[in-house]
Image (cartoon, rainbow, N blue to C red):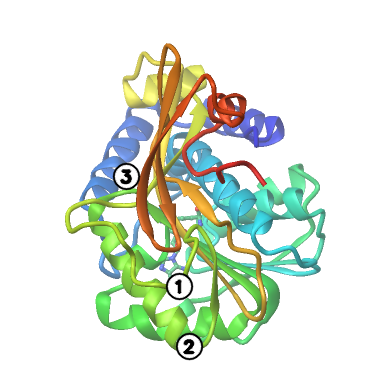
Amino acid sequence: MEFPAEIRNRINELTENEDLKALKASAAKLSENYRNESANGKRGAATRTDVVAYAAVRMPATFAAVSKALELSLKCFGGEINSILDVGAGTGAGAVAAARLTDCDNVICIEREKNMLELGKSFCECTGVSAVWERRDLTDGITETADLVICSYCLNELPEKQREAALSELANSAKKLLVIVEPGTPFAFERMKQIRQSLLNMGLKIAAPCPSENACPLPEGDWCHFTARAQRTKLHKLLKNADVPYEDEKFCFIAAARGECLPCKVRILRKPIIKSGNITLSLCEADGLKTELVTKKSPLFKAARKSECGGEFPPG
Ligand SMILES: C[S@@+](CC[C@H](N)C(=O)[O-])C[C@H]1O[C@@H](n2cnc3c(N)ncnc32)[C@H](O)[C@@H]1O
């Protein structure tokens, strides 16, 4: 899903009143924190400048990732979503993406940082998403429930010892579906595997991305991740000293359902390798990993040519 033009315009307006040097410094600090993988409970973007920098340089990528994770998750869920809860909502990437994908206007966002919350609230307003924002620390407990609970790029900010309790609060809040999105790094994937096991232990079903609830078949050192593309604005390129007009955000995710769901049978795990006359697909199936060579003669060739990493094969 495209990054909403209303938010992009609002970000451009906001940055006109900011000192560019300070914004660049905040953007660099955010990138460094992101590379270091875990804030371990420390406050991330908190000042007004940090939060505007977050919206300008991180939000387009987190929005792209959470949108794609939600699209893949909702496809494997099949039920109706009449309420949404976004925990650690930041500037509202998950809330806006989920509201647009489900056409649901019953949205609650929980966020600890005042400046994040204020900006998130204004982005919801300008995109027509009617959301109630609550300023709270999620480790104090989550009392709200919703059909769909989202937690994107937030669990990695909690100290290790608070994560399991937070996960169980998130799972209890989800009446139908819980979607967790984290960076697409080997480190975050290891954590995602633990999250997956904990959710199974809590009695939830894995809707996506896994085709089964068996142990993950990936060998040690390999990691399951997907990519979402975010277009870069002039401002984004300026703040990140980047030339390329887009950014490919790597992410991993898990969607867990309370009750029956429709997991895909075969998930494409890597970017298909297209050569003249054949396409090689890396697949994850219920009984393990498989590499499939689809030749021009195959009735699946057309579908393989259109296929992409993260998709189902053959497409459902
Ligand atoms: C990296 S941002 C992600 C924001 C948004 N979910 C997204 O995908 O763009 C993490 C957010 O989680 C919030 N957060 C971190 N720890 C929190 C906690 N204990 N309680 C509530 N919010 C928290 C941070 O303030 C921040 O806004």
Would residue 23 appear left or right of 259 to someone viewing this image? left
Quarter-wise, where is residue 145 in the image?
A: bottom right
Along the viewing direction, whichever of 77 and 180 lies nearer the viewer:
77
Would residue 143 appear left or right of 242 to someone viewing this image? right
Along the viewing direction, whichever of 258 and 287 lies nearer the viewer:
287
* Badge number at residue 202: 2
Give yes or no for contact between labels 3 and 2 (Cβ–Cβ under 8 Å): no
Where does the N terminus fall, quadrant-wise? top right
Along the viewing direction, whichever of 99 and 69 lies nearer the viewer:
69
Tell me the distance, in whole angstroms, between the alpha carbons under discs 3 and 2. Answer: 34 Å
Tell me the distance, in whole angstroms, between the alpha carbons under discs 2 and 1. Answer: 13 Å
User: Pointer 1: what residue?
Assistant: 213
What is the x, y in percent for residue 116? 52, 55
Within the displayed image, which quadrant is ligand 1 positioned in?
A: bottom left
Which residue is pictured at 45% across the width and 63% down the height? 286
Q: Tell me, yes or no, if residue 92 can be seen here.
A: no
Question: What element does badge 2 sit on?
Answer: loop
Quarter-wise, where is residue 16 in the image?
A: top right
User: Pointer 3: what residue?
Assistant: 30
Q: Residues within 10 Å of mark 2 (few under 14, many from 20)?
A: few
Which residue is pictured at 60% across the width and 57% down the height? 73
Would residue 93 appear left or right of 44 to someone viewing this image? right
Which residue is pictured at 45% across the width and 14% down the height? 277
Q: Is residue 152 above or below residue 225?
A: below
- What's the residue type where badge 1 is placed? Glu
Question: What element does badge 1 sit on?
Answer: loop
Q: Which tag is nearer the camera, tag 2 or tag 1? A: 1
